[in-house]
Amino acid sequence: MFSFTVEKQLGNKLGRAAKYETPHGVIETPAFVTVGTKATVKALTPEQVAGTGTQVVLANTYHLYLEPGEKTIKLGGGLHKFMNWPGPTMTDSGGFQVFSLGAAYGENISKVSKLEKGEVRKEEDHPLPEKSLHEKLSKIDEDGVTFKSVIDGSTHRFTPEKSIEIQHDIGADIIFAFDECTSPKASREYQEEAMERTHRWAARCLEKRRELKVESENLKAEEQALFGIVQGGRFDDLRKKSAKTIGEMNFDGFGIGGSFDKEDIETAILWVNALLPEEKPRHLLGIGEPIDLFGAVENGCDFFDCVAPTRMARNGTLHTKNGRINITNAKFVRDLGKVDDDCECYTCKNYTKSYIAHLFRAEEMLASTLSSIHNVHFIVSLVHKMRQCILNGGFSEFRDDFLGRYYAKR
């Protein structure tokens, strides 16, 4: 039902072009996975999503569990039928919400940290945040996570087994093991503790999936690929240990999760992918910045997901080959050009910067739709071009040319 075939390797790098066969179609990789958190890509219909070139949509287990509930989705025929998306789908495990509702809640902390110029990362800079920061909307223990709903404040609990059961009922093609995503500000001691817990949870996820498979009425378990997640934060020995441990487990593919330092994200990816089995796909979770996508592709990642393209679009920030623009700026009010001269998306073929600027100023819903179509198409197409360059040559030249133009003004 699932098969992963590498078509061509990128020179002496780990990057590769491949094809991943799923029950709902073949994914050509590397591929950007468009995020549809609540079984919808915000502001877009499934037909519009498909029009951007998107091959795969990822939904959020935590949010779908809270609303409408996994049983409702199962009753509606599973995720594909429920949201009317015919192509491959993924669901994350809910593990990221452990981070966003715990260590990151109210702290303006991202999973990728950035050192200020001249700053050196010191262990004592961030001593053991778990006691003060994790006691927020979620609390972690060895068995799982207790959390409060962001909708009504009600208390709920996720365990590895519960996460697999929920994802089983939602019915995506590719699901992820339940993990603990740590803050980039967490100490090494806590990063190691969370990593070891993630490894134990991974084994429990595999066992729960095995149980579902032997239950004859749960045929869907035979049609789902389960990916294990590598953790370890910004520490090379922890990342390598996690990659080796998770890589030796019987997963169908792998996710690279957790926190990174912006300056060495490529190095961290290389640590991991150099150890993971070559014959299985690798997914970098939550990364969507162009420079990071190039580094991830070059260092052996096959999938990526991020909410950034649509979130930026709804705020009026649009991608162009010459960098980002804020379409609400006054200079675009009478600009009758396309958002990006070379873009072939529906928005650029039919509308001007002036019109989109007008929609934002008038607070029309169409502003988010047209902007999201453009941004998703831009990122999906960018990763597709990387794939073509791996197959046909010229990856390094394409990378240098694109990044030189995109970041020239920064």
Image: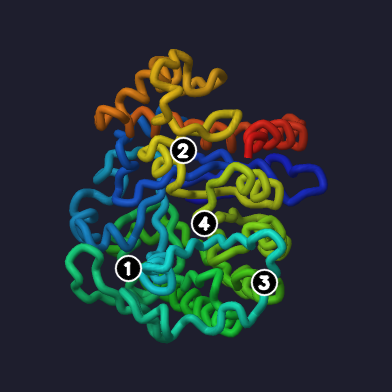
Residue sitting at x 39%, y 15%:
350
Disc 2 residue crowd, few under 14, some 14–19, many 20+, Cα 10 Å? many
Disc 1 residue crowd, few under 14, some 14–19, many 20+, Cα 10 Å? some
* Cα distance in 3D space between marks 2 and 1: 25 Å
Mark linked to residue 121: 3
**First in residue order: circle 1 vs circle 3:** 3
**First in residue order: circle 4 vs circle 1:** 1
Residue sitting at x 20%, y 71%:
153
Nearer to the camera, 136 or 171? 136
**First in residue order: circle 4 vs circle 3:** 3
Residue sitting at x 42%, y 21%:
353
Disc 4 residue crowd, few under 14, some 14–19, many 20+, Cα 10 Å? some
**First in residue order: circle 2 vs circle 4:** 2
Q: Position of residue 97 (x, y in %)?
A: 38, 66
The image quadrant of residue 67 is: bottom left
Mark linked to residue 165: 1
Nearer to the camera, 231 or 253? 231
Determine whether the residue tagged by mark 3 lies in a helix, strand or loop.
loop
Residue sitting at x 32%, y 73%:
162
Which image quarter is the C terminus in?
top right
Amino acid bearing label 1: Glu
Query: Where does label 4 land, which residue?
Result: 285
